Amino acid sequence: MSIIADFEFNNASLCDGVLLVTQEIRQDFPLADVRKQLQQLVDDARAAMPEGLNQDQQLEVLIDLFYRQWKFGGAGGVYRLSDAIWLDKVLDKRQGTPVSLGVIFLHIAHQLDLPLMPVIFPTQLILRADWLDEEMWLINPLNGETLNEHMLEVWIKGNLGLSAELEDEDLEEAENTLIVRKMLDTLKAALMEEKQMELALRASEAVLAFDPDDPYEIRDRGLIYAQLDCNHIAISDLSYFVEQCPEDPIAEMIKMQIHSIEQQRVTLH
């Protein structure tokens, strides 16, 4: 995971950062094939783009291509959340989350020199374009629909409470590092829920590459180790969390978990 710690995410493309961490987590990740598919989408978008369009018209064409013709969109039916995050699965099924779809859409837009930027809104990732006339265009990467202020107000009140207001900083461009971390948090939680514990552990290690001393991430790693029956390391990680965050409401539950693991060790011996 030292590759992640050394990589300058904010000086590289978001897509390259996502591909890097995915490759670190999944040894079977088909990197060359994914890059080839992404390049094919860029080539197809260029070929379909009529000449003489201004940038907002080009973006309209790309939205139509991506969501209507290529049929990218939100995952539906019965599916594993992790499969809606892994870029190879998203490219194959054309179904994803706001982050995974946003990463692919942004990659194509940037290759076409369209000034699109990612925004971490309190509810999900959204895409923002600023034009020469200073108009802001906000797009939902799940379906390509334009978002207006009223819709964002509804989202924010539904997520944070009726007293919450839409603030200017809610629509500021997000750093790549923050987006990759958010994606990893979601992926780790999904893999834990799906009982894919070996992959969850690698996702946890990837998150910790950004902040090695984060007690909450170390706690999660300890819970994963407990599921993998690596009890000695699990106790070490969980104890670290209790020491660092004794006032946290969940600390008592973690103490009970540590006690339970210790009892198992006594029984086994």
Image (spheres, helix red, strand yellow):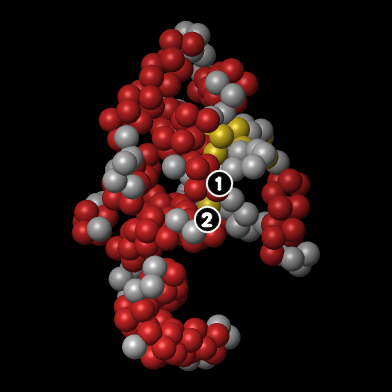
User: What amino acid type should be assigned to the residue bearing mark 2?
Assistant: Glu
**105 horizontally vs 13: left or right:** right
User: Can you say whether 263 is above or below 237 in the image?
Assistant: below
Residue 97 placed where, x, y %? Answer: 56, 43
Alpha carbon separation for disc pair 2 and 1? 7 Å
Residue at position x 38%, y 19% in the image = 40
Residue 239 placed where, x, y %? Answer: 39, 86
Which of the pair 203/235 is nearer the observer? 235
**1 horizontally vs 256: left or right:** left
Residue 106 placed where, x, y %? Answer: 45, 34
Which of the pair 121/68 is nearer the observer? 68
User: Can you say whether 53 is above or below 10 in the image?
Assistant: above
In which quadrant of the rendered view does residue 4 lie? bottom left
Q: Earlier in the sequence, mark 2 or mark 1?
A: 1
Asked if residue 72 can be seen in this view, the reply is: yes
User: Can you say whether 55 is above or below 227 in the image?
Assistant: above
Residue at position x 52%, y 88% in the image = 256
Which residue is under mark 2?
A: 194
**191 horizontally vs 122: left or right:** left
Which of the pair 255/246 is nearer the observer? 255
Residue 133 placed where, x, y %? Answer: 56, 32
Q: Secondary structure at mark 2?
A: loop
Q: Secondary structure at mark 1?
A: loop
Question: For residue 80, which numbered disc appears in the image?
Answer: 1
Q: Quadrant of the C terminus?
A: bottom left
Instruction: Please rate how many residues cluster around mark 2, counting C-alpha atoms within 10 Å: few if below 14, some from 14 to 19, many from 20.
Output: few
Residue situated furthest right in the rendering: 162
In which quadrant of the rendered view does residue 209 lie? bottom left
